[in-house]
Amino acid sequence: MFDTIVIGGGASGITAAIYTVRKNLKVLMLTKNIGGQAALSGAVENYPGFTMITGADLAEKFRTELLAFENKGLWVKEGVEVINLSGADPNYLVKTSEGSAYHGKTVIIASGRIPKMLGVPGERELLGKGVATCATCDAPFYKDKDVAIVGGGNSAMDAAFALLKVARSVTIVNNIDSLRGDEILMKNVTTSANVKVLNNHEVLEILGETAVGGIKIRDKLTKGEQVLPVSGVFIEIGWTPSTNFDKLTDKNDKGEIEVDQYGATSVPGIYACGDVNDQPGEQIVIAAGEGAKTGLRVAEHLSKVPHQA
């Protein structure tokens, strides 16, 4: 049995794992990938210690530090998906999609968020064929092509920042009257010659048979419709917490796990940190801080749990 099982390998999960293993605890991390959403960020300019670093480079530094503890109290299972969490304090059972099951005295849920989708015709059919949710991953495929980004917040700005360097043109389709995001990031994007912003517009349909050929949009004020010929559509309209496997803890109306200031959930022995919980501020540095705080609280909790092999 593990002292704690960390579900998720982003900034919060990595930090929680490091802090718990440094307390001489037996720790298992289960994650689809090490780095989480940080790895998908373009330019990170607000993480202490780095004036500017790419998300991929920051994630690689996370990986290096994390894996330094492997076989020293830490076990990492990468490329796995958690499908069920059951049990009670101090014996929880975590099952994964490949059929494995692990017991832990405590569980730290750091599974992050998954992208929201538009729900319009053509979106699902063309996913991976021009419809994408990760500009940092897919931007190189759109060199000298016309692309559209749907959204108007920081996620959309990050996507635009990644794409404007390679695409011929970037059109941001925003369904409200102005962009919302960090001022510096918005300025860097909107002052670029190959970026166009269409506020108060909504996407009606994504067009194409075997690949994206365009999108049909509508002006919400005039009701006029038009087709934008693009080769790629990046959906950047927000995220939803990744908690499908968790039926134990209390959630708010957004599906976020409710926690106290230390990451404790409504269930003794289960903790949540990072973007999956109901705390404000979806930032890499905040997620890392929450992971540290939660890791320390888990160690404190376990100091009061009777020994169990």
Image (tube, grey):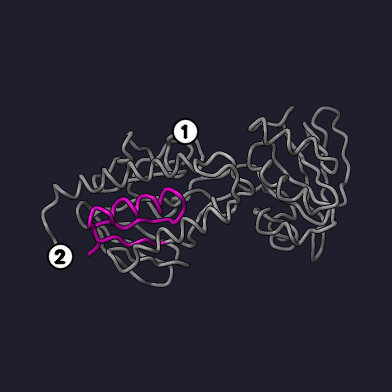
Could you say which is closer to the camera, residue 252 or residue 67?
67
Residue 204 horizontal side relative to residue 75, left or right? right
Secondary element at image label 1: loop
Residue that carries the numbered disc 1 in the rendered image: 280
User: The disc labelled 1 sits on which kind of residue?
Assistant: Pro
The answer to whether residue 16 is magenta is yes
Q: Residue furthest bottom?
A: 99
Query: What residue is shown at x 31% (from left), y 47% (from top)?
Result: 295
Kindly check if marks 1 and 2 are in contact, taking CB atoms under 8 A apart as contact: no
Q: Residue furthest left?
A: 306
Q: Quadrant of the N terminus?
A: bottom left
Q: Position of residue 73 (x, y in %)?
A: 27, 63
Query: What residue is shown at x 88% (from left), y 35% (from top)?
Result: 224
User: The disc labelled 2 sits on which kind of residue?
Assistant: Ala
Secondary element at image label 2: loop
- Label 1, label 2: how many angstroms apart (C-alpha)? 37 Å
In the figure, residue 14 lies in which quadrant? bottom left
Residue 182 horizontal side relative to residue 48, left or right? right
Marker disc for residue 20: none
The answer to whether residue 140 is magenta is no
**Which residues are drawn in magenta?**
1-30
- The count of marks equals 2
Residue that carries the numbered disc 2 in the rendered image: 309
In the figure, residue 152 lies in which quadrant? top right
